[in-house]
Amino acid sequence: MECENYNQKFEKISGWEKTSDGREAYSKIFKFTDFKQAFSFMTALAMKAEQINHHPEWENVYNTVTITLTTHDKGGITELDYDMALFAESCFKNYI
């Protein structure tokens, strides 16, 4: 039931898509002007991840950061994933 509520919440955040690998997870691609901006964004998210002890799956290729959120020990989406998505969106606004 918890996942269903957060699935609905994720659908309201622009650009986040359910992964196609069968997991309860959401992913988004963020594009920046250059590597420096992308890395700065990742650093901000890393500090938040440490603060709340919830670490995203992510990949960085030059100016692109792909983030996948799921709570592995719960087997799906939780409030931590939703909060991290909102934080990522808030940080990203500094670069557009």
Image (cartoon, rainbow, N blue to C red):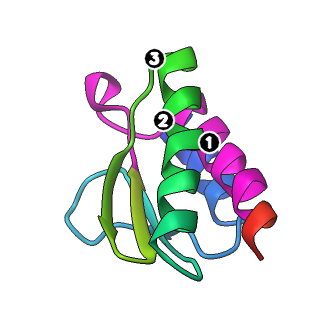
Q: Quadrant of residue 76?
A: top left
> Vertical placement of 41 versus 20: above or below?
above
> Vertical placement of 12 versus 72: above or below?
below
Q: Is residue 63 magenta?
A: no
Residues under labels 3 and 2: Cα distance?
Answer: 10 Å
> Vertical placement of 18 versus 53: above or below?
below
Indicate the position of residue 89 as horizontal and vertical percent values: 71, 58
Please, what is the three-letter code of the amino acid marked with disc 2? Ala
Q: Which mark sits nearer the N-terminus, 3 or 2?
A: 2
Secondary element at tag 3: loop
Indicate the position of residue 66 as horizontal and vertical percent values: 39, 66
Disc 1 crowd rating (10 Å Cα; few below 14, some 14-19, many 20+) is: some
Q: Is residue 88 magenta?
A: yes
Q: Which residue is mark 3?
A: 53
Residue 15 visible somewhere in the drawing: yes
Quarter of the image that includes the C terminus: bottom right
Of residue 89 and residue 36, the one placed in the foreground of this image is: 36
Of residue 36 and residue 87, the one placed in the foreground of this image is: 36
Please, what is the three-letter code of the amino acid marked with disc 3? Asn
Of residue 80 and residue 33, the one placed in the foreground of this image is: 33
Q: Which mark sits nearer the N-terminus, 1 or 3?
A: 3
Q: Which residues are magenta?
A: 69-92
Q: Main secondary structure of the magenta part?
A: helix
Q: Which residue is mark 1?
A: 82
Please, what is the three-letter code of the amino acid marked with disc 1? Tyr
| Left or right: residue 85 compared with residue 92 | left
Indicate the position of residue 81 as horizontal and vertical percent values: 53, 39
Indicate the position of residue 68 as horizontal and vertical percent values: 38, 55
Q: Which residue is mark 2?
A: 46
Secondary element at tag 1: helix
